[in-house]
Amino acid sequence: MCDGYDPAKCTTVSEMLARLGDKWTVLVIMMLGDGPQRFSDLKRMVVGVSQRMLTLTLRALERDGIVERTVHPTVPPRVEYALTDLGRSFSVPVKALGGWVFANHEDIQSARARFDERNAEAGPKLIKLG
């Protein structure tokens, strides 16, 4: 794919595809698609994410210019996260991917169950994702 292209751009493509493939990124971006959210609200909406992983995910997205962090000068300080313009454009394929998974969840689970049944006696167990 990167033959004849700028190697730096190819590296960025690889990094952003890895970001997109990160376990929490898709869910965080989907939650921020409805507007700014506080950390505690994101933690509640992204089921299963630890405080540490949510912090790391938000920092990585902030570094990439996908998310902006705003601290409101209140007591206690109120911090909100929102998609940037770049983040909103990135959310288009992210929402499409997440929507596809949600729409096909039952079919995916059925396919996995059929596969596992067929391969139950086939030796070492496969690692289950998610």
Image (cartoon, grey):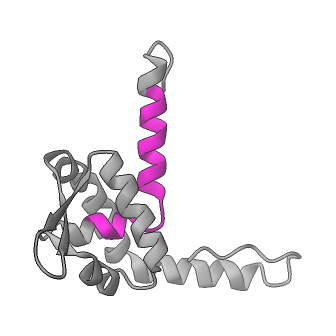
Residue 23 placement, left or right of 39 = right
Count the labels in the image.
0
**Measuring 35% from the left and 64% from the top, which residue is drawn there?**
26
Q: Is residue 126 magenta?
A: no
Q: Residue furthest right?
A: 123
Instruction: Please say whether residue 24 is one of the residues in the magenta stretch.
Output: yes
Question: From this viewpoint, is residue 26 visible?
Answer: yes
Viewer-side residue, 57 vs 129: 57
Q: The C terminus appears in which quarter of the rendering?
A: bottom right
Residue drawn 27% across the image and 45% down it: 65
Above or below 127: residue 61: above
Q: Which residue: 61% across, 85% down?
A: 113
Q: Residue furthest top?
A: 4
User: In the image, residue 94 lies at what x, y percent?
Assistant: 30, 58
Q: Of 113 and 43, which appears nearest the observer?
A: 43
Above or below, 118 relative to 9: below
Say left or right for 58 vs 117.
left
Stretch of the chain drawn in magenta? 10-29
Q: Image quadrant of residue 125?
A: bottom right
Residue at the far front in the pictured view: 75
Q: Is residue 81 left or right of residue 16?
A: left
Task: Write the residue at 28% across / 69% down.
Answer: 99
